[in-house]
Image (tube, helix red, strand yellow):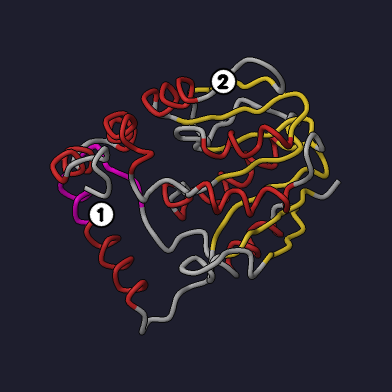
Amino acid sequence: MFHPQGPTFWELVQQALSSTERGYDLLAPKFDYTPFRTPDSLLELVAPLIGNAKSIDAALDLCCGTGAGMKMLRPLCRDRVVGIDFSHGMLEVAREATTTDGEPKLDFVHGDVLDLPFTDEFDVVVCFGALGHILPKNESRFIEQIAKALRPGGRFVFITTGQPSRLSLVYWLARGFNAAMHVRNTFIKPPFIMFYLTFLLPAVATLLEKHGFRVAIHDNVFPRPFHEACVVEATLKA
């Protein structure tokens, strides 16, 4: 499915019937051959908005998965790039796919992004393609953890969009998927947490400002079919 080397339909069903962590452990070896991975072509367009080569000391990739964001961040950093994920399987694939020799240093951390083990350590924090794992009730805690991990003046950078039109196919496909996940989680435990149409503008900008960030929104960054997405650059006030 998706790609000859990607997961089969039944492998995706097995993933969906597992816990979130176990599901991604199962999917990890084939994750890069699915549409769930943020394309390198999009990450390359985000990189110049973050900085020039070697312009940043340290960066953190939340829910780093197989390491695509870390790969993008590495040329921008001087000292350290850290990826954190709760899936051992995804971290193992990231380690195998990444050359750890040279600078900056790469660190792979198994952990929960709602309880980050970092304080005032990073100039930049990013999160790509994983915000649907953060339930609305946990969004404030998520942003608090990011603020804790950042140095004063540090930035949180991510991709999102506004609410799509209720007349659009995208809206109804996303709502249908979310409804199916709610039903699945009602009857099958442990839950699988992944929802679409979350962390959307303008609500997320208001929430970031509430937690001490200045928010800049970069439009017209991506080509079709991603042209409605934008890059949010939230700077923690010093």
Tell me, yes or no, whether the highlighted magenta stretch contains residue 223.
no
Q: Is residue 167 left or right of residue 150?
A: left
Q: Identify the residue at image location x=73%, y=62%.
A: 216
Q: Identify the residue at image location x=82%, y=45%.
A: 153
Give the mark, 2 or 1, whose residue is nearer the N terminus.
Answer: 2
Q: Is residue 123 left or right of residue 92?
A: right
Tell me, yes or no, whether the highlighted magenta stretch contains residue 191.
yes
Q: Is residue 123 left or right of residue 183?
A: right
Q: Which residues are magenta?
A: 183-194
Measured as percent of width and height from the top left, residue 229 is found at: 54, 65
Q: Quadrant of residue 117?
A: top right
**Dot 1 alpha-carbon crowd within 10 angstroms: few under 14, some 14 to 19, many 20 or more:** some
Which is more toward the observer, 95 or 99?
A: 99
Q: Number of marks in the image?
A: 2
Marks 2, 1: nearer the viewer: 2
Circle 1: residue type = Met
Q: Quadrant of residue 126?
A: top right
Placement of 168 over or under 62, stated as above or below: below
Measured as percent of width and height from the top left, residue 144 is found at: 64, 43
Tell me the element at label 1: helix
Measured as percent of width and height from the top left, residue 73 is found at: 65, 37
Residue matched to label 2: 99
> How far apart in space, not on screen, are marks 2 and 1 (Cα)?
37 Å
- The residue most toward the front is 4
Residue matched to label 1: 181
Circle 2: residue type = Thr
Q: Identify the residue at image location x=45%, y=25%.
A: 91
